[in-house]
Image: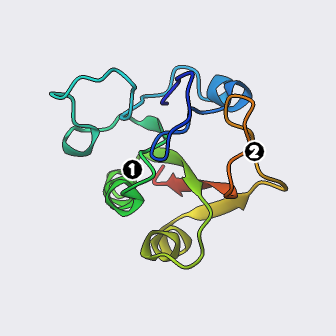
Amino acid sequence: MMEMDKMSGDSYATPKWLFELFDGWFDPCPLNNNPEFDGLNIEWKKRTYVNPPYSKPLLWVEKAIQEKKKGKLIVMLLRADTSTKYFQRCQEEGEVIYFGRRIKFNGKTPYFASMLVIFNGL
């Protein structure tokens, strides 16, 4: 769930209020700086929340779609960028929920809008 204190170009910590909604869910993107942990190459759990690195979201969206097809519930926090292939895949395979305004990450508002995408294979 990428809980961290700083914002960078690739990593935005899930806001606390949103993080708490997914308490107890599997997190394939923990901020643990363990180079041997690869959330893209492991089996995800029945309920998984993903706040992936923002530099390569398509890889994570495709993984979420694979896991959905195995009967899992995957919720992703992503940048809402309608010009991208990952956005198109989210619309094809999931349910997209837009926030009414830009959400704050650790008290800072980024330059982009965010969305939740639900891939429901249950």
State the residue at coordinates (19%, 43%). 41
* Residue depicted at 45% across the width and 72% down the height: 89
Give residue 61's position: percent from left, percent from top: 40, 59
25 or 33: nearer the viewer: 33
Three-letter amino acid code at the position of disc 1: Gly
Q: Identify residue for label 2.
A: 103
Is residue 82 positioned above or below 43 on the image?
Answer: below
Q: Position of residue 116 (x, y in %)?
A: 63, 52
- At label 2, which amino acid type do we have? Ile
Q: Distance between the residues labelled 1 and 2?
A: 30 Å
Q: Which of marks 1 and 2 is nearer the N terminus?
A: 1
Dot 2: element: loop
Q: Quadrant of residue 86?
A: bottom left
Q: Residue 71 carries which label?
A: 1
* Residue at the image point whose x is 55% and y is 53% from the top: 78
Left/right of residue 84 with respect to residue 30 in the rendered view? right
Q: Give the image quarter of residue 39.
A: top left
Q: Residues within 10 Å of mark 1 (few under 14, many from 20)?
A: some
How many numbered marks appear? 2
Is residue 20 left or right of 101 when viewed as pictured? Answer: left
Residue 87 position in % (x across, y down): 52, 71
